[in-house]
Image (cartoon, rainbow, N blue to C red):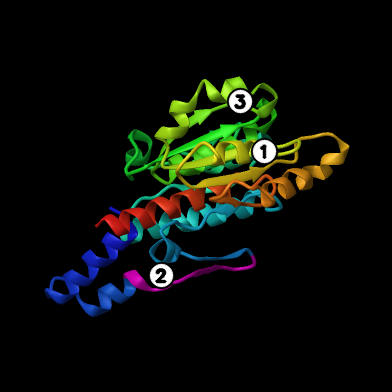
Amino acid sequence: MNPTEALQQLLAAVAAGETSVDAALARLKNFGFEAIDGVANIDHSRVIRNGFPEVIWGEGKTPDQIVQIMTAMQHKQRELGFALPIMATRISESVFHKLHLALPELTYFEMARICAIVPEQTASAPEKPGLISIITAGTADLPVAEEAAITAELCGFQVKRLWDVGVAGIHRLLNNLAVLTAADVLIVVAGMEGALPSVVGGLCDCPVIAVPTSVGYGASFGGVAALLTMLNSCAAGIGVVNIDNGFGAAILAGQILNTAQKLNN
């Protein structure tokens, strides 16, 4: 059950006289957001507004702060009767080990630098329609690509991975055209000069989300060169997210698929 269904069920119970208004109010108290003193204001209702729950940005937070936030999110889900992944991004292995002591149910995705409390139904199979294919220009782009892949999978989408098919050996990409044409949304991750999204955009009829990475020599300026290349692409239908923002690319891909699903219903 997702939060919208849980809320509908609660309101239906009130309407049917099976739950009192006071009992419902007790369950809904602080549903909009919850203040964790000195740490955070947790946006519990975000998933109802835009389809995806709040995700914790781990970098810059202490392990204790992350534990407090995750624990509060977990308690709220139990209170309202639903279960969604509780994610934290940009988590180093050393930080994860500290988090795991307090939250032994945490799963760590090392390459993606994501840790999450994963409900059983999310881990078993994709629940949302649509295929997100994620492509990298090189192996060095994998951390950003895996951040996108794991995020999309935890959000319930089917993901296909295709790694190391950059323009320096374009035959590698052309030998995998079936992967491109099967996708409903493509996320293309590239550093250096960032040319791969333009090539992919010229071959496919689905939305392409370009992700510049900070991989490259000095004149790549930490990903700015790839970012500018992608923004200036002459291939139509390409959207660009910020440098190294695999998480943002995955959420955008999910929003595209969610909108398509609404239109089909």
Q: Are marks 2 and 1 in contact (CB under 8 Å)?
A: no
Residue 213 x %, y %: 70, 41
Q: Which residue is mark 3?
A: 165
Residue 215 x %, y %: 75, 36
Query: In this picture, which residue range is highlighted in magenta?
Result: 27-38
Relative to 92, residue 43 above or below = below
Relative to 43, residue 109 above or below = above
The residue that appears at 45% across and 64% down in the rendered structure is 46
Secondary element under disc 3, as helix, strand or loop, is loop
Residue placed furthest toward the bottom: 21
Magenta span has 14?
Answer: no
Amino acid at circle 3? Val
Mark found first going from the N terminus, 2 or 1? 2
Q: Which residue is mark 1?
A: 92
Residue 94 x %, y %: 68, 35
Q: Which residue is mark 2?
A: 31
Number of marks in the rendered image:
3
Amino acid at circle 2? Phe
Mark found first going from the N terminus, 1 or 3? 1
**For this rendering, which residue is in front, 111 or 188?**
188
Relative to 239, residue 181 above or below = above
Would residue 69 appear left or right of 76 to someone viewing this image?
A: right
Q: Nearer the viewer, mark 3 or mark 2?
A: 3
Mark 1: few/some/many CA within 10 Å (<14, 14-19, 20+): some
* CA separation in Å, label 3 and label 2: 45 Å
**For this rendering, which residue is in front, 52 or 81?**
52
Mark found first going from the N terminus, 3 or 2? 2
Q: Nearer the viewer, mark 1 or mark 3?
A: 3
